[in-house]
Image (spheres, grey):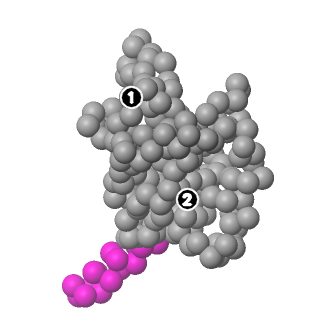
Amino acid sequence: MNYALLTLLAFSACCSIGACASSTISLSSLRLVQSSDFPGRLVTKLSPAITGNALAVLPNRELIRVEFTASADLRKIAKHGDKIVFLHSYFCDRGDNYVGLSGPAVYVEAADTNAERSVNGSDGRYVFFLDITRKAHPTSIPPEQGFDLSVKSEDICFYVTAHGALITTYRSSVARIPKAAIDQEFGAKASR
């Protein structure tokens, strides 16, 4: 086999598992919401295999709804084979250290779940939910730090991965939620 044919075959295999997908993600918007404000008919998970639902956990609590865009079609990646799409979030200055700022689920508007293109014309828009507070669990493995973003906010980084049976098939760039944007949301809440 010649080199050009091998390169073409490698590229085709790469793209068939989603690893060649463009990987840029960026923050679109954020706002404070109550977990009860977004029942399953409004947002749905890309990967139903992810257990737990940040929106269904009782008691009702305040969350930060984060909307972001992705240059890759995460819906298509999730539907391709047995891929599970995960969201990873952490305090930027502390590194990806399992603080547990959000659940791993990535959501889309329910009306867009099976659509080729978004019904509202906003292709590549996805949602996840950040907890505002979390108690520390120092005895867990690894230990989890506590936080309260309404008292002390920090820059938050996030990225998306997709996993097949044995390998990670997609990893996005890292996007940042600036501390100032979080502070602005809590300032807007206080002035309402």
Q: Amino acid at mark 2?
A: Tyr
Residue extent of the magenta highlight: 1-16
Horizontal side, residue 112 vs residue 153: left or right: right
- Residue at screen point 43% across, 57% down: 27
* Residue farthest toward the front in the current orientation of the protein: 191
Real-space CA distance between mark 2 and mark 1, rounded to the nearest whole angstrom: 26 Å
Tell me the mark number nearer the camera, choosing from 2 and 1: 1
Q: Which residue is mark 1?
A: 152
Q: Residue at x 41, y 11 (%)?
A: 139
Q: Name the spot of residue 52 as percent of width and height, x first.
A: 64, 36
For mark 1, give the secondary structure. Answer: loop
Please say whether residue 2 is one of the residues in the magenta stretch.
yes
User: Relative to residue 44, is residue 58 depicted above or below?
Assistant: above
Q: Closer to the camera, 49 or 132? A: 132
- Which residue is pictured at 67% across the width and 73% down the height? 120
Q: Main secondary structure of the magenta part?
A: helix
Tell me where residue 21 appears, x and y as whole percent: 41, 70
Verify CB contact (< 8 Å) between mark 2 and mark 1.
no
Q: Residue furthest left?
A: 3
Image position of 168 (left or right of 164): left
Q: Which residue is mark 2?
A: 126
Looking at the rendered structure, the kind of residue marked 1 is Lys
Of the two numbered discs 2 and 1 on the same chain, state the one appearing first in sequence: 2
